[in-house]
Image (cartoon, rainbow, N blue to C red):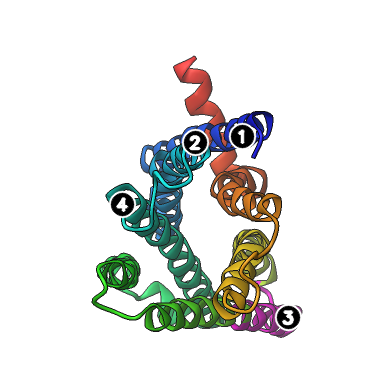
Amino acid sequence: MRFGELLLWCTALGIVSLAILIVNTLTIVALTRTKLLRRRTCLFLISLACADLIVGMLSVPMYIYQLVTRWKDPAALSTRSTVFKAFQVIDIFSGLASVFTLTAIALERTYAIGWPLKHRAYNPRFYTILLSSVWISASLLSGLYLLFQYELLQHRVFFYFMMAALFLSTFLMIIAYLIIWIKARELRKEYKNRRSRRLFQRTTEKERRLAMTLFIVTAVFILTWMPFQILNIIFFFTCTSFPCGPPDTVIYFCKLLHYANSFLNPAIYSSRIPDFWKAMKKMVFCKC
């Protein structure tokens, strides 16, 4: 890589890292210091913002360091170095935390729209348990990679666990939002001619808008993550047959797209959830 190319990629990654830090910090503050926290779904949004914050705070800067170090001396940062191992584990952990949080959001919204009465009766402890399982699962899978790095586990075992978790999560998200769409249509037809139509439609509209917002977040996540995961699959199955692999530019672009997802989520919230935008605007202007 030429110095100009290195500078271009590092600048782009630096801008993405700064954007991630700013928007996700504002997101966490806006959600924790306003009445939005009363909505139990916002706990998932805080969890997602925390995962994205780890990406901007640790993953992206370490990736920039990795690029610069390898540009200076390709042999300086080997796969056995502590820095490389730490970067890989943190990168995998934060990414899996985002994936699992989005899956939990999709399943929770499915239950909220499909079975609203049962959903309202849930104890808040249920959300704590669900979110804890998200972060514990991400920790366990990233721990498998650490075992591979210390040659205590074969790479293919970690790879298959990783791909299974990602594709299962994506499949559950797609099925969940398909169920939400079907349930929303059924509920509209069922309550179309009832006296409580106005109140119910108003409530349903809020739920539908929130579900659509979370669907957009999930769709954007899949679009920004899929290219990078496809590259992982290509490297795993063709590294012996085609040692050269894809061009470096393609790899860096897919990684940049992968990281960019971490600041797109709050942008979607602010444009789709009016209360979130009001809270964010009020907080920013008060601080200014």
In this picture, which residue range is highlighted in magenta? 175-196
Q: Earlier in the sequence, mark 1 or mark 4?
A: 1
Q: Residue at x 49, y 72 (%)?
A: 103
Is label 4 or label 3 in front? 4
Tag 2 and tag 4, C-beta contact below 8 Å: no
List the residue tagged with mark 3: 185
Is 190 within the magenta?
yes
Give the distance between the C-alpha atoms of the residues marked 4 and 3, in whole angstroms.
Answer: 55 Å
Give the vertical position of 171 relative to 261 (above or below).
below
Overall secondary structure of the magenta section = helix
**Circle 1 SS class:** helix
Give the number of the disc on residue 68. 2
The mark total stands at 4
Name which residue type carries label 2.
Val
Is 24 within the magenta?
no
Most extreme residue toward the top is 288
Q: Earlier in the sequence, mark 1 or mark 3?
A: 1
Name which residue type carries label 4.
Ser
Name which residue type carries label 1.
Leu
Give x and y (percent) for residue 61: 44, 38
List the residue tagged with mark 1: 6
Q: In front here: 249 or 239?
A: 239
Give x and y (percent) for residue 42: 44, 55
Q: Residue at x 47, y 27 (%)?
A: 283
Give the vertical position of 263 relative to 156 (above or below).
above
Q: Earlier in the sequence, mark 4 or mark 3?
A: 4
